[in-house]
Image (cartoon, rainbow, N blue to C red):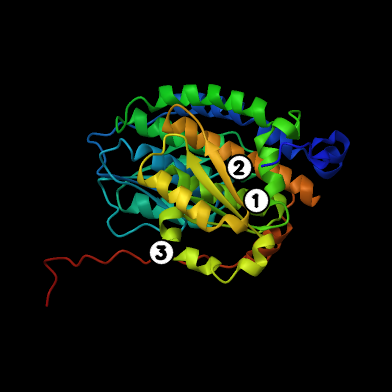
Amino acid sequence: MTTEPIPALDDLVRMQAIDKRNMLRLINELPEQCETALGVARNFALEAFETKPSDVFITGIGDSAIAADMAAAVLSEQAEIPIITDHGAGLPKHIGEDSLVIVMDYTGKSSVMLRNMRDARHRGAAVICLSGSGKLLEQAAKDQISRIAIPPGQPQRTAMGYLLVPIIVTIERLGLVEGEIEKLSHAIKHLKNVREALRFENPSSRNVAKQIAQNLFGKLTLIYGVFGYRAAVARRWRSQINTNSKNLACCGVLHDMATGEISGYELSGGRAQDIAVVLLKDATDGGVTVDLVNAVQEQLAQFNVTIADIRGATTVERMFYGMYLGDYVSYYMALLNEADPFRTEFVEIIESKLEGEPEPIAPAPPVVEDEQAED
């Protein structure tokens, strides 16, 4: 990556003209947001369980689902029960009285999440609602469901601390993992150091997020991470680059890509100048994973491959670092594109077209016939 100054990314007046609603402030505030979320999650009224759940099912849409994916990837390293995530499809058949269902929706407006919460309650599962406002939180209060009420009032994609931290804390409070709250506290301190390195005031000559943004500028961006938290972080990069910078991005799992998808690059050499590849690399990688990253990087050398090194002492720290790096990269790409990072016009158009459309109704539970009924 270049270490030469990038004037377009160091110009304060230009930045303020593009980012009139101050998306940068919301990105900068992530560490403090995580601190607030940590306090909320430690203190909300959590219903005691007579026995530990047999499984945890976390359901959300969009950035809520990405937060669930990242939390599940970290927690699954230690948890002895399955932690499953869902992007709005609905509750699988096995969810029942021994399950814990966490329903997430920052705005509280999703009828899909409202349906999932009702379905989980109907099946007798333990339910926790994580939301900032809206009908979801109101219904949870009415049904006396455990609620994690997080601060509302900002775009969901900027509320990842509020969405991610409470899941990890809650799972530890339930006794399903140990030591993750302490790791979170260290991760928040780590985030503050990361912010100093990536913030706008740090010039492009020594700001890796600005340098990566320059590498990806104007190109179809494909982000790959290996299994676990990096696959979830790759999804976050894709979402942020698409939404903030209005630059088309896709993502995938590196192992899957290397066994099939990489063939798609074979006849794309003539368009290499229009494609950028990002490989998320963990500093603790070793053995086969390092060999795989190196082999893919070598094979795709003509496609402007960027290695994004993810650093941190624990998996939680590295997950937050990878996410935060992607947030800043997407912001600086927005500046290069002269695109308002706050604006989501296409999303709003789709939402307006769907207003009033009924959501799919969950199938009714089977009727249990009375054993005494006549033939």
As measured in the structure, the alpha-carbon distance from the residue carrying label 2 to the one carrying label 3 is 36 Å
**Looking at the image, do the residues carrying marks 2 and 3 touch, with CB atoms under 8 Å apart?**
no
Label 3, on which residue? 362
Give the mark nearer the N terminus: 3 vs 1: 1
Q: Quadrant of residue 4?
A: top right
Q: Residues within 10 Å of mark 1 (few under 14, many from 20)?
A: many
Label 1, on which residue? 241
Picture residue at 60% right of the left edge, 33% below the top:
151
Residue furthest to the bottom in view is 375
Please state which amino acid type lies under the numbered disc 3.
Ala
Q: Residues within 10 Å of mark 3 (few under 14, many from 20)?
A: few
Report helix, strand or loop for mark 1. Answer: helix
Q: Where is residue 301 shown, x and y percent of the image? A: 57, 55
Q: Which mark is residue 306?
A: none
Report helix, strand or loop for mark 3. Answer: loop
Picture residue at 69% right of the left edge, 61% below the top:
273
Picture residue at 64% right of the left edge, 28% below the top:
195
**Looking at the image, do the residues carrying marks 1 and 2 touch, with CB atoms under 8 Å apart?**
yes
Picture residue at 48% right of the left edge, 29% below the top:
312
Q: Where is residue 234 shown, x and y percent of the image? A: 52, 49
Give the mark nearer the N terminus: 1 vs 2: 1
Where's the N terminus, which quadrant?
top right
Q: Where is residue 158 shown, x and y percent of the image? A: 63, 40
Seen from the viewer's position, the closer of residues 366 and 1 is: 1
Please state which amino acid type lies under the numbered disc 2.
Gly
Where's the C terminus, which quadrant?
bottom left
Label 2, on which residue? 326
Seen from the viewer's position, the closer of residues 359 and 247 is: 247
Residue 318 shows in the view:
yes
Q: Answer left or right for 197 relative to 289.
A: right
In this rendering, the answer to whether 344 lies above or below 148 is below
As measured in the structure, the alpha-carbon distance from the residue carrying label 3 to the one carrying label 1 is 33 Å
